[in-house]
Amino acid sequence: MGTVKLDSYRSVLSLPGVRSLMVIALLGRVPLTAVGVTLTLHVVGDLHLGYAEAGLVGTAGTIGAAIGAPLLGRVVDRRGLRPVLVLTSIVEVVFWLSAPALPYVALLVTSLLSGVLSLPIFTVVRQSLAAIVPAEQRRQAYALDSMAVEISYMAGPTLAVLVVTQASATVAMMAIGGCLFAAGAALWFNNPPVHGGDGTRPAGPPPRRREWVSAQLLAVLAATVATTIVLAGSDVSVVAVLREAGAVGWTGGILALWGLYSLVGGFVYGARPKAAPLVLLVGLLTVFTFPIGLVGHQWGWMALTLLPAGALCAPTLSATTDAVSKLVPAGARGEAMGWQGSALTFGMAIGAPLAGAAIDAGGPAWGFVAVALASAVVTVFLLVVRHRMAATADAPASAQFGDGLAARSGSGDGDLRISERQSTKV
């Protein structure tokens, strides 16, 4: 069984361009995951302001990134990858070199603007994997990608704190800028395909949004939002529950276990011979999140109760990415991946305050309940869409997903035909 698991990943990593893309992705993602902690420590320590002001700077950058992701993806679809890499790499360097000297208001404004034009390393990697990896192997590719993201989130904040405490926030910000510029330059020289394995853009004008935006795609984006609501809200809820139980010292270890569970879950999911339906993954994540807060008074029980929900995080996120790649034609995949990136950001942005409000109103355990309820609503939506897709499975493609699909199904790499066959697997 172990050999089979390794072989399923080896076959993906042996594809031309995949290994180099994963290495570049790690180079770019680790500094991006260090941004929040670094800016917080800079605002609090160097500018001598409060955590609320620090949070606003992070929120401004998050909003900017959510706005910019689909816009940059659209440019990639129309102009190619390299012009976007040149622009965003320059913006990253200018922002991070100047940020240590900026007063607070200027830092807040430039954080928003630089967020719009931030290096789109997350979406570019996902789009490139869709272009490089055949559809039948993308589940393994995106599972690898999700595991790499977990590693980045485990390493980035830790390295940021280390650099700030051993040197300064200024050094950390310059290091972030340098690493992001290096990642942009590496992507520019590597120039991975973003539309097809041969690196060429599809012939003809890009497809219009009404030709590829469907109820099924919206359901997948909703699932993405729900998943990150659970992730962000659970982080806050873990801290609140352990604090009330007088076990704050175990917070770092519990959150590290949460990341490790997700890492292992992503590995197992990618090694499975068949994909699980997205609605099942989101539904199970919802069910297993509800009871976590009930055992917070014992940190050991919390570590155990987090296991099933944590193990579902990476699989659910990789499943949403895989679904987007198969539902959208190659010529629009950059914008669609950008919208998925915005969905990830949106879920993260509302998950923490939603859990916080529930904790303030009813106690720490209600943080888990609140985010699980939000995920439950999306699960019902997925079930409705799944039922509609199953009911119309025998109808013509144009009747199911809008005009123009029949003409598009012969373009790109055949993903739309695949999505028709798998329409009942949402």
Image (spheres, helix red, strand yellow):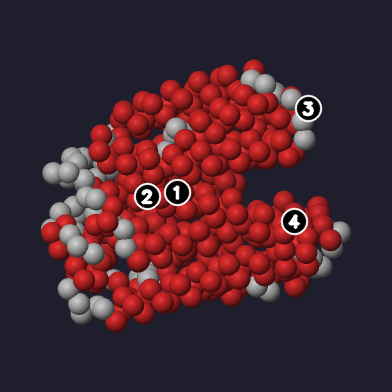
Residue 96: where, in percent of width, then height? 55, 24
Q: Which residue sits furthest right?
A: 246
Residue to which mark 2 is pinned? 337
Element carrying mark 3? loop
- Lower position in the chain sequence, tag 2 or tag 4: 4
Residue to which mark 3 is pinned? 48
The one nearer the camera, 15 or 241, is: 241
**In the rendered structure, are the residues bearing label 1 and label 4 in contact, judged by CB atoms less than 8 Å apart?**
no
**In the rendered structure, are the residues bearing label 1 and label 2 in contact, judged by CB atoms less than 8 Å apart?**
yes
Residue 138: where, in percent of width, then height? 32, 57
- Which quarter of the image is occupied by the C terminus? bottom left
Mark 4 Cα within 10 Å, few/some/many (few <14, many 20+)? Answer: many
Res 236 → quadrant? bottom right
| Residue kind at label 1, given as amino acid type | Gly
- Lower position in the chain sequence, tag 3 or tag 1: 3
Which of label 3 and label 4 is nearer to you? 3
Residue that appears at 53% across and 24% down: 95
Give the CA separation, mark 2 to mark 4: 32 Å
Element carrying mark 4? helix
Using the image, tell me which numbered label, if any, was put on residue 239: 4
| Residue kind at label 4, given as amino acid type | Val
Residue 80: where, in percent of width, then height? 26, 35
383 is higher (above) or lower (below) than 226:
below
Residue to which mark 1 is pinned? 341
Residue that appears at 37% across and 75% down: 386
